[in-house]
Image (cartoon, rainbow, N blue to C red):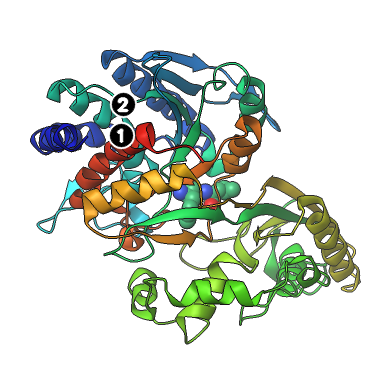
């Protein structure tokens, strides 16, 4: 295998400008799934991927998912499914990624145009979606192209599944995966997802766990329209005042979830587990660098990693309908919707968490004695996932990391969520591996998101090398 990989690696290096160009084109399409008016761009991005795949000789289909639940005027973006190679003597690897991105505005504080890939002199490539998840998705396409141009036989059949609603909770995809598990995905021997990040900036990792995410809204309304605070302040129950109080009962400033019963749902901490955290290449400085501050909750790395991986957290995200522009506007908003989410861990069940949340919010609101109306509801939920890293899929990836980066990767879990990971595992019955490309400083979801050129190019080598090792690793 070594000479083939060498030829492949050389080809990746010589095509690196073309690969960056491909990323530039992808970043230029503002495929923001959360913004209704950008939906055509999300669809355009799916079509861009499909046409790139077609030109590489893959068999591509754009599968419609129908209308968006609760937003019937909006069409969900299609799932791009593709097959490259159909040789029954080869293994089949199913890869998943997402082509939608988080919102981004220059005014948010970006140093460069968010939808224009901009490279600095240190080889950092800035742009929304560069690391999450357009770079990794294109990584698979680039791996195909470099094999072709190097004249190296592609080691596996590659099945691809790229969605356009991941950042919005993967609407519609669960059913699609279940439906296709015995059809389009039936040959899959293993699954690989490249949609997370290294823990630091130096050492690659393989990831075997994710937290789940239950996302909620609390809607408080009363007056028929927004009111002048000079005329009505002091005479009316104000929705914003109620909401701030209710949201303030959810979590304490030191990160403790204040909803009764939540802690009882969390799997107890074991001695065996304790040893896992100490050996991981992660420092408080890594945290501070990616935070851009030293405002961590805990002084030590072990507790910090546990806080990210194995305990739940509750974050307050924002308030729809509240005055948020610069300046001073003396308005009383008539209806406000507070948004928060809970990252869930083993053994928290979605429904059990919902019940506790609804009870807590309704009780907290009732305690205010307000005449306003309060409604709490779930926007979307995805379950946590923890797999076994003692599978040939992980062994193959570990060898690929050693080959490309010269080190043994850490085995990590993640605090973020990729809702369909568990669905792929359950639908195909196969092992799922997370194989990240970017690093902890990439600022996914934040301003100035970037992907280092080195992580992109070596990452393309890594994805290709993984496929070679996965083709040969004895199955266990
Ligand atoms: N790439 C992330 C998932 C991720 C984040 C993995 C951090 C590991 C660490 C993905 O695009 C994402 O952000 N997912 C959403 C899912 C949510 C909407 C259910 C997330 O985690 O917020
Ligand atoms: Zn992502």
Do we see residue 222 in this rendering? no
Q: How many marks?
A: 2
Where residue 251 appears, as percent x and y from the top left, is 69, 74
Viewer-proximal residue among 229 and 88: 88
Element at label 2:
loop
Residue 468 shows which numbered tag? Answer: 1
**Which of the 4 image quadrants contains residue 87?**
top left
Task: Categorize mark 2 by other alpha carbons within 10 Å: few (<14), some (14-19), many (20+).
Answer: many
In the image, taking residue 366 as reference, residue 83 lies left or right, namely left
Determine whether 451 is above or below 190 in the image: below
Task: Categorize mark 1 by other alpha carbons within 10 Å: few (<14), some (14-19), many (20+).
Answer: many
Q: At 32% from the left edge and 52% from the top edge, which residue is drawn? A: 438
Read off the residue under disc 2. Answer: 155
Q: Are marks 2 and 1 in contact (CB under 8 Å)?
A: yes
In the image, taking residue 147 as reference, residue 300 lies left or right, namely right
Where residue 202 appears, as percent x and y from the top left, is 26, 64
**The N terminus lies in which quarter of the figure?**
top left
Do we see residue 308 in this rendering? yes
Viewer-proximal residue among 393 and 170: 393
């Amino acid at each position: 295998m070594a000479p083939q990989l060498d030829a492949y690696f050389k080809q990746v290096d010589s095509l690196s400008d073309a690969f960056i160009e491909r990323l530039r084109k992808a970043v230029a399409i503002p495929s923001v799934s959360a913004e209704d008016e950008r939906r055509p761009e999300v669809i355009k991005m799916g079509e861009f991927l499909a046409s790139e795949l077609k030109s590489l000789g893959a068999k591509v289909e754009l599968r419609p998912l129908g209308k968006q639940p609760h937003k019937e005027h909006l069409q969900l973006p299609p799932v791009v499914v593709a097959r490259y190679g159909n040789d029954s003597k080869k293994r089949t690897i199913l890869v998943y990624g997402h082509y939608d991105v988080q919102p981004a505005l220059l005014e948010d504080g970006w140093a460069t145009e968010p939808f224009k890939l901009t490279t600095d002199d240190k080889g950092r490539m800035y742009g929304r979606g560069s690391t999450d998840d357009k770079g990794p998705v294109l990584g698979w396409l680039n791996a195909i192209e470099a094999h072709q141009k190097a004249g190296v036989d592609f080691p596996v059949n590659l099945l691809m599944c790229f969605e356009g609603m991941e950042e919005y909770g993967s609407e519609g995809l669960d059913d699609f995966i279940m439906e296709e598990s015995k059809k389009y995905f039936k040959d899959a021997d293993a699954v690989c997802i490249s949609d997370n990040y290294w823990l630091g900036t130096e050492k690659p990792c393989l990831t075997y766990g994710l937290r789940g995410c239950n996302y909620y809204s609390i809607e408080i309304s009363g007056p028929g329209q927004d009111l002048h605070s000079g005329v009505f302040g002091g005479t009316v129950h104000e929705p914003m005042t109620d909401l701030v109080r209710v949201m303030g009962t959810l979590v304490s400033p030191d990160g403790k979830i204040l909803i009764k019963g939540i802690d009882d749902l969390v799997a107890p901490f074991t001695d065996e587990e304790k040893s896992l955290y100490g050996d991981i290449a992660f420092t408080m400085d890594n945290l501070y660098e990616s935070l851009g501050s030293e405002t961590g909750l805990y002084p030590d790395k072990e507790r910090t990693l546990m806080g990210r991986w194995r305990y739940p957290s509750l974050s307050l995200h924002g308030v729809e309908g509240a005055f948020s522009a610069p300046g001073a506007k003396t308005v009383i908003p008539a209806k406000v919707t507070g948004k928060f989410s809970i990252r869930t861990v083993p053994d928290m069940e979605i429904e059990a968490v919902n019940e506790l949340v609804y009870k807590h919010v309704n009780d907290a609101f009732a305690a205010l004695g307000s005449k306003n109306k309060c409604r709490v509801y779930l926007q979307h939920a995805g379950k946590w996932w923890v797999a076994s890293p003692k599978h040939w899929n992980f062994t193959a990836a570990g060898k690929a990391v050693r080959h490309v980066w010269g080190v043994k990767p850490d085995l990590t879990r993640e605090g973020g969520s990729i809702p369909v990971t568990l669905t792929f595992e359950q639908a195909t019955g196969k092992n799922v591996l997370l194989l990240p490309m970017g690093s902890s400083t990439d600022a996914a979801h934040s301003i100035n998101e970037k992907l280092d050129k080195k992580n992109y190019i070596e990452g393309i080598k890594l994805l290709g090398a993984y496929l070679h090792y996965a083709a040969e690793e004895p199955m266990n």
